[in-house]
Image (spheres, grey):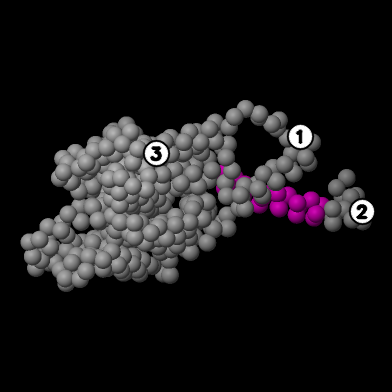
Amino acid sequence: MAGHLRGVPGHGARRGARASRVTGDASRVRAGALGRTAFARLDPTGAAPLDGRRGSDAAGAARLRGARRAGERAPPCRCGRDPVKARRAAGLTGAIALLAIAVVFGLLAGGVRLSPADLVRGVGPSGETARLVASLRAPRVALSALVGCCLAVAGAALQALLKNPLADPFLLGTSGGAATGAAIAAVAGLSPLVSPAAAFGGAVLSSVAVAALARRGGRLDLQRLLLAGLIANAFFSAVLLAVFSVASGQTARTMLFWMMGSLADATASKVLALAPYVAAGFAVLLAFAGRLNLFAVGEENAAALGVDVERSKRIVFLASSLLTGAAVAFAGIIGFVGLLVPHAVRAAVGNDQRTLFPVSAIAGAALLVAADAVSRAAFAPAELPVGAVTAAIGAPVFAWLLLRNP
């Protein structure tokens, strides 16, 4: 029969067309399988889409075309509430509630303790309470929230980029460079207003040097990035020890307090100066969140799905360094926020970076506002470094998380 059909005009062309369609369907199914694999690692329920322009729509369309060709009907609509969306909404709502509670606590706590009634009565153009809140506590709460947002989002981005749950904003040498810049400015007798600029300059130089050391064959090697960060931290630690050895007593004490994290000098002008860095860094990382999702299945598979892997790695690293450098420049070195918050948020909302970044920003702000309020209220009128409070909170909580998930 096949031999007779070979002589039929058009039979070979139809067979070639069918083979071409099969080949195209196979390639589309492969892309869809990669997309489904990537999302399965992000969300085992498979209820939410991947990056809307890459993989998800094409794979879904290919499956629907295959169903029509096979004479199958599309699956019926499930009208119940999506459990994944409900989980994410609950996580976002909880983070916002925690931030609201932390802000109220931050406005009330301090050397002069206020009650909620005092706060309500004092919201007006005159009165001691209004002046206290407007000139001291409100700027401090706002600066705490912005710094916490920087550290938490930078930590979440680095953990996704390096695929290392222990990655931290201070792991890659950015904080060491910022601290060194601020310390040199203090020893040189420059104005305190120059210290944030010097710290930010040190963070930028450190990030550029680490990125240059981590390049191999024109690519940003993630293992070399970690090693380069360790080298940078060791170098800047040596420089800081040398700077401490020549600093006067009062200067050394001020530097030490700042290096342990301090928001004592918060002003409205500092809040306005920090806000553009936070907005820029967060916007860049949120734009690359979908690409970071695809990194979960490996760089080769992400590239097969259309991601420019090298460009994405460079931009995510620099945006994370921008957020970390800005936070250190305005508040000193504050540990555990960038390590702890992404873990807690990931347990609540899952691994999708598009949800993880915004919720981490809010939760990080809430944590640092609350920690700063505790640092002011615990031994009032004396004040603890806020970095000591975050370490006291973060170390046992992180140890519990490790024991809970061996």
Q: Residue at x 18, y 67 (%)?
A: 186
Q: Residue at x 20, y 56 (%)?
A: 258
Q: Position of residue 168 (x, y in %)?
A: 32, 51
Q: Which residues are magenta?
A: 15-37
Q: Is residue 315 above or below residue 400?
A: below
Locate residue 19 relative to residue 233 in the image: left or right.
right
The type of residue carrying mark 3 is Ala
Residue wearing tag 3: 100
Q: Secondary structure at mark 1?
A: loop
List the single residue furthest toward the top: 80
Locate residue 212 relative to residue 335 in the image: left or right.
right
**Is the stretch drawn in magenta largely helix, strand or loop?**
helix
Q: Nearer the viewer, mark 1 or mark 2?
A: 1
Q: Position of residue 361 (x, y in %)?
A: 41, 47
Q: Which mark is residue 72?
A: 1
Q: Which mark is residue 8?
A: 2
Q: Are marks 3 and 1 in contact (CB under 8 Å)?
A: no
Q: Is residue 128 above or below residue 308?
A: above
Q: Which of pointers 1 and 2 lies earlier in the amino acid sequence? A: 2
Confirm whether the magenta stretch covers residue 71.
Answer: no
Locate residue 219 relative to residue 47 in the image: left or right.
left
Separation of disc 3 and disc 2 at Cα?
77 Å
Please tell me which residue lies in front, 280 or 191.
191
